[in-house]
Amino acid sequence: MHYRAKIAAAFVAGTLVAGGSAWAANVNHEIKACVNNKTRVMTLAPASGRCTTGNSALAWNITGPRGATGAAGAPGVTAAATAGSSFDVEALAKQLLPSVVMINSSFSDGSAGSGSGWVASIPARAGDGHSYIITNNHVIDGASSITVELQDGTDLTGTLVGRDPVYDVAVVMVARAGLPAVEVGDSSNLVVGEPVMAIGAPLALAGSVTAGIVSALNRPVVTTGSSAGTTSYINAVQTDAAINPGNSGGPLIDPSGRVIGMNAAIASLSSSTYTQSGSIGLGFAIPVNQAYRVANELASTAVIANGKVSELGVSQRPVLGVNFDGSYTGVGARVSKVSVGGGAEAAGITVGSVVRRIGTQVVRDASEAVAAIRAAVPGSTIDVTIDLPEGGSRTVQVTLGTDRSN
């Protein structure tokens, strides 16, 4: 979610788009914390390691909370590390902080907000005298002006290059060549339990770093921005690394220092549209394979001359060629319409069929189906398992169509 004085992003299905306090990760083998006996809120322990009255001490190492006894984790391995891996948060933060920016957006109604972004390499724009920053669409959605703040405090004017609300991805350029880009990783290789680090500007606190693990994969998350038609369906990476208002658009980093996701949303216990909440350990990131593909297409197709964008870039979206029945309450996504000449029709999917699986991903409802489809590459061929209207089930191969973002 991006942090804005006048809330633009809304809660949808228990999530809030995260467009921005976090505990500083410790690179020793354990972290000492204090838990309030009444509120159960956990904070880092003071340097002495002693907690004040009303708080209980807790030590966390590679094996988790160990209370007052138990063996410490191996030296050099942090709390977030998994067996056989190391995660040097201190070194990664030093390396990557110059590549992460805070994005300040101003709006015509006089309000303002902030989010995060990361510098990316765009091969088609190499040597053009600009640097390109990837962020969430909801961070800049409706902004009348954009300012990019670098790690050293330098403010640069940001220019929108392109955006795709469906993927909640946007690209902003600044007239500064050579900003260090973050290396792009491969989110298809992620495993649950892998250590990760989030960098961003929660509550406009630039350069904040938090650490955690990949808690789950392929979480269907629905988020809504401020403008009409800005609902996005994300097949998200779930993490317990603290993500707060203002973190949106910031990178989620793997132990090798590569971005594997873009922080976008958090779950909240609040149901109020007008209340921003903080992290409860349920954060969601757009997988980088999806985010970077879209961003690269947006930046590569924009019409730019003499530092001016005359035409925003466009991206490609995969199309299955069906509509889903929003009133269906059974398990799966029931097809209410099949597009003539589309991939679904060619594969033999008919009205009344219920999609139960896309690829290896189980589909429980229409939102999960949409998120899984949008995670695919346009023009690719995917397996779709359906329950047939007349009974029985089968798996068909569907070649996805392509649609432009604008």
Image (tube, rainbow, N blue to C red):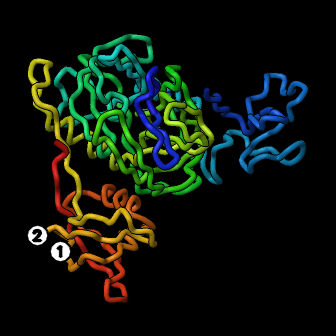
Q: Residues within 10 Å of mark 2 (few under 14, many from 20)?
A: few
What residue do we see at 20% from left, 77% from top? 347
x and y percentages locating residue 245 in the rendered image: 51, 30
Q: Quadrant of the C terminus?
A: top left
Name the amino acid type tagged 2: Gly
What residue do we see at 11% from left, 69% from top? 341
x and y percentages locating residue 270 in the rendered image: 59, 39
Q: Residues within 10 Å of mark 1 (few under 14, many from 20)?
A: some
Q: Is residue 220 above or below residue 199?
A: below
Asked if residue 245 lies left or right of residue 235, the reply is right
What residue do we see at 29% from left, 34% from top? 170
* Residue 310, picture quadrant: top left
Asked if labels 2 and 1 touch by Cβ distance under 8 angstroms, the answer is yes
x and y percentages locating residue 107 in the rendered image: 32, 19
The total number of labels drawn is 2
The answer, for residue 98, to whether it is visible in the render is no
Q: Secondary structure at mark 2?
A: loop
x and y percentages locating residue 357 in the rendered image: 39, 72
Q: Secondary structure at mark 1?
A: helix
Alpha carbons under labels 1 and 2: distance apart = 6 Å
Q: Is residue 392 above or below residue 103?
A: below
Q: Is residue 343 above or below residue 25?
A: below
The answer, for residue 224, to whether it is visible in the render is yes
Residue nearest the observer in this picture, 230 or 173: 230
- Residue corresponding to mark 1: 345
* Residue located farthest toward the bottom when viewing the structure as drawn: 391
Asked if residue 238 lies left or right of residue 86, the reply is left
- Residue corresponding to mark 2: 341
Name the amino acid type tagged 1: Glu
* Disc marking residue 358: none
What residue do we see at 44% from left, 39% from top? 264
